[in-house]
Image (cartoon, helix red, strand yellow):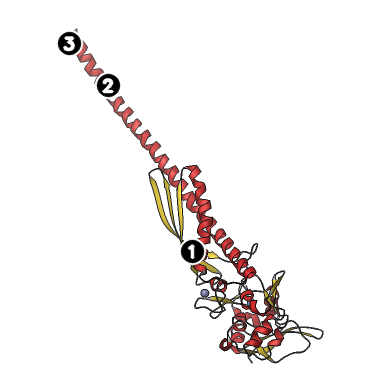
């Protein structure tokens, strides 16, 4: 009886063994599943942080640059080291965003390493170091972004004319244009330039908007100067090897070693056409004595006796596809 019972128990155990093994395997699998699910959730959260920062940093950078530009416009004082100031100002705004992640149990640190000019003068280049930590999962990445300085809904102003004309009576803003009153005439006069008086009450665009007439040589088509007139009416800025980039404009420079921008400064329409005057390009007019050179009149529009003209040298005429002197 005892012997039979022992045999029965042994058989039962052999029968139960596979069930037990299966049970243990299932429990193990389920545990692993839960653990990897937690890890997936955490890495999704981390990815979300990177996406948030990638989206927010360009917006904050434009906001900082805009505040700095209006500071230069109102104080008339250019920055000495705009790259460092911009990095510090941006760091302050980025910290306000990253602190909010504490509530979700995430430690987020974003250090703005540098901001500098880009190959494309309508962009700036930003490098930041992002570290995200959640419990024992940590992720670190260098974020490199090319940030557009163009925002049609909230455009950045050009601070340069306000710095250059400060000591000559100043420039002022009216709508989306900068008006120079007598200041540019005085500026040119003090540098011994002839015919600077055509720039009495001259104006130029306030906001940085990129010219869509690309390649630039098409500004000369058709010969009626319609494209050139459209460009001037809209106040577009152009890429230039000689003009200053946006960051250097905040430092009050008309030229710089980086790929930069140039814009036309327009004399008001007149019924008294001049032949020559200093070249109507901003980096030329805002130059020092040796940098200012003359241009010859191009008439791009006429209304009754009023002549709309600007003055360009051969090298700018060539660039924009306009008839040579
Ligand atoms: Zn243009
Ligand atoms: Zn520059």
Dot label at residue 3: 3
Crowding near pointer 3: few (<14 within 10 Å), some, many (20+)?
few
Q: Nearer the viewer, residue 65 or 172?
A: 172
The CB of the residue at mark 2 lies under 8 Å from ligand 2: no
- The Cα–Cα distance between marks 3 and 2, rounded to whole angstroms, is 19 Å
Question: Which residue position holds label 2?
Answer: 15
Q: Residue furthest right?
A: 304
Image quadrant where one finds the N terminus = top left
Q: Quadrant of residue 194?
A: bottom right
163 in relation to 45, above or below: below
**Camera-side mark, 1 or 3:** 1
305 in relation to 170, above or below: below
Q: What is the secondary structure assignment of the residue under circle 1?
A: strand
Q: Quadrant of residue 272?
A: bottom right
Residue 32 located left or right of residue 260? left
Image quadrant where one finds the C terminus = bottom right
Q: Position of residue 263 (x, y in %)?
A: 62, 77
Residue found 27% across the figure and 21% down from its top = 15
Q: Is residue 147 visible?
A: yes
Q: Nearer the viewer, residue 64 or 267?
A: 64
**Camera-side mark, 2 or 1:** 1
- The Cα–Cα distance between marks 2 and 1, rounded to whole angstroms, is 68 Å
- The Cα–Cα distance between marks 1 and 3, rounded to whole angstroms, is 84 Å
Residue found 53% across the figure and 52% down from its top = 96
Q: Quadrant of residue 216?
A: bottom right
Dot label at residue 195: none
Q: Position of residue 250 (x, y in %)?
A: 57, 71
**Earlier residue among tags 2 and 1:** 2
Dot label at residue 126: 1
Q: Position of residue 157 (x, y in %)?
A: 63, 69
The CB of the residue at mark 3 lies under 8 Å from ligand 2: no
């Amino acid at each position: 009886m005892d012997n039979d019972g022992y045999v029965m128990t042994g058989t039962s155990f052999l029968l139960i063994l596979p069930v037990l093994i299966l049970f243990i395997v299932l429990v193990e699998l389920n545990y692993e599943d839960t653990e990897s699910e937690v890890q997936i959730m955490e890495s999704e959260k981390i990815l979300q942080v990177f996406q948030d920062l990638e989206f927010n940093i360009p917006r904050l950078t434009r906001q900082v640059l805009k505040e700095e530009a209006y500071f230069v416009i109102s104080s008339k004082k250019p920055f000495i080291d705009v790259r460092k100031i911009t990095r510090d100002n941006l760091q302050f705004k980025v910290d306000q965003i990253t602190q909010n992640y504490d509530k979700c149990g995430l430690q987020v640190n974003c250090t703005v390493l540098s901001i500098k000019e880009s190959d494309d003068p309508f962009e700036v280049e930003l490098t930041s170091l992002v570290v995200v930590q959640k419990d024992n999962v940590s992720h670190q990445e260098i974020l490199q972004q090319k940030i557009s300085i163009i925002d049609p809904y909230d455009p950045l102003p050009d601070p340069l004319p306000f710095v250059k004309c400060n000591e000559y009576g100043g420039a002022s803003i009216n709508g989306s244009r900068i008006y120079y009153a007598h200041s540019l005439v005085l500026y040119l006069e003090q540098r011994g330039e002839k015919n600077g008086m055509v720039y009495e009450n001259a104006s130029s665009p306030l906001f940085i908007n990129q010219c869509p007439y690309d390649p630039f040589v098409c500004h000369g088509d058709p010969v009626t100067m319609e494209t050139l007139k459209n460009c001037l009416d809209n106040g577009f800025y152009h890429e230039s090897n000689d003009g200053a980039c946006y960051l250097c404009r905040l430092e009050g420079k008309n030229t710089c070693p980086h790929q930069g921008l140039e814009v036309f400064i327009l004399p008001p329409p007149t019924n008294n056409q001049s032949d020559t005057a200093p070249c109507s390009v901003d980096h030329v007019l805002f130059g020092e004595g040796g940098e200012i050179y003359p241009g010859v009149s191009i008439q791009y529009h006429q209304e009754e006796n009023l002549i709309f003209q600007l003055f360009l040298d051969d090298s700018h005429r060539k660039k924009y596809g306009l008839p040579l002197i």
